[in-house]
Amino acid sequence: MVGLALLFAALPGAQEPKPLTRADVLAEATKVAAMIPSIDARAVVTAGIALELRRDDPQKGEALLAEAGFMATTEAHEFERALAMQAVARRIRQVDAKWASDVLTEAAELVYRIPFPGQRSLALMQIGMARAEESPEAGLELLEEAVTQARDIVEPQARVAALRDLSAAFVPLKADTAQALFEEAVATAEGLPAGVERDLSLADLAGFIAQRSVQQAIRLIDTIGESAARSQALQSAVLAFPVEEAEAARELAQRVPDEFARAETLAALAVAVAEGKPEVARQAAEEALATAGGIAEQETRNEGLALAAAAWVGIDVDRALAEAGRIADPYFADAARARIAVRLAPKSPERALEITQGIERVVLQSEPLSALVPALAAKDPAQARELARQILARRARAEALLAIAASLPGGTPEEAP
């Protein structure tokens, strides 16, 4: 059979393999997107595909964009519908500002049918941020209403988190309001009765406080008694340190009381400072391994070792792979290799692909494949498409195909989103 295939391939007039085109890849992406179970995710991904299609065929692209806009309105739950509509509106704006504005107006009106103030606040914040891209005044009005809703949240920890997020949303628009909201969030958390709820609320704020003042964050953390909340707060503070202060961050990481959280913090720090402070990164990675290895509970220890192994990828890839190979549980060894491949994909896609192909559990290949496809799309789009087809999650697969289409020649650059 193989001989016959070769014979036919050699005959005069035998067809060459059809070249990969943007139209083919976008059609495949559209089909995959149509199978995404979540309506809001389906609408957002379809809108992204529509914008890319519009570069080749404006009429078809805008028709698909209209389909995505309608799709967002069919989400059964008001909260998810409002979020989907604002996300699609951001993409529609690249085609028609008036149309996008109308979608945002409809989404804002929908918010008041949401029964929970926390969800109302979050939806208004997202819509306000989208509106601010066209009109800062209109965006501010919606953000101020989001603050009103946030203050109605009964559960203190959720209220603190909402005020914190709104503080960040206000930063590019109104710095004094952003600072006032941040101070309100801190005061609300500090005013809670001593106990777990207060500690968790303060832990939610630690990373934000550290961005403004590390010393203030540490003083606040010293008031947290509950171990898990203290670990969370210290982890946030450590990762908020500037790279120049990596050694101080590493020393602070040693104060994380929970062993797994300490190993996770040290591993994350090693990744964050690998380029700027390689010696600190190496020491943090060593300490992450040692800490994870001392955890008594087996599954938690293996997860910690997987995180610690992957922390080496920016310092020494061979060491990272060796540490992954030392993990006794095959699942966690593969989980470590998957993390290594994800981090390696942008700079060394060929090595990342080799590692990914050695992962036995298909479910753990999806994330590295999603990182690999954009890295390989321009160099070898056919290979990238084959890899995209192996991604299990439909949204990630559709987005990978979209990345390939964007790298292929065609379209009109002046209309590119």
Image (spheres, helix red, strand yellow):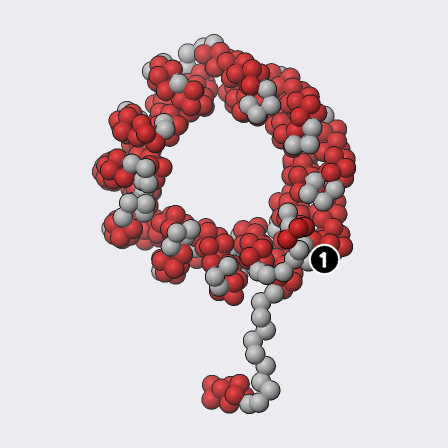
Q: Nearer the viewer, residue 343 or 159?
A: 343
Asked whether 81 or 9 is in front, the reply is 9
Residue 68 percent across, percent down from the top left: 70, 47
Q: How many marks?
A: 1
Image vertical order of residue 272 relative to residue 221, above or below: below
The residue beneath circle 1 is 57
Secondary structure type for disc 1: loop
Residue 406, above or below 215: below
Q: Is residue 123 visible?
A: no
Under mark 1, the amino acid is Asp
Horizontal relation, residue 105 to residue 411: left or right: right
Q: Position of residue 81 (x, y in %)?
A: 68, 37
- Check the image and report above or below for 243 versus 19: above
Q: Position of residue 52 (x, y in %)?
A: 64, 53
Residue 194, quarter of the rendered image: top left
Q: Look at 59% across and 19% down and name the residue there.
A: 174
Q: Quadrant of residue 44?
A: top right
Q: Position of residue 402 (x, y in %)?
A: 58, 54
Residue 237, located in which quarter of the rendered image?
A: top left
* Side (left or right) of 117 relative to 393: right
Instruction: Indicate whether 376 appears above or below 260.
Output: below
Task: Report crowding for label 1: few under 14, some 14 to 19, many 20 or more residues within 10 A (C-alpha).
Answer: some
Q: Residue at x 57, y 25 (%)?
A: 172
Query: Which residue is found at the position 55% from the left and 57% from the top?
Result: 407
Q: Residue at x 63, y 60 (%)?
A: 410
Visible residue check, residue 167: yes
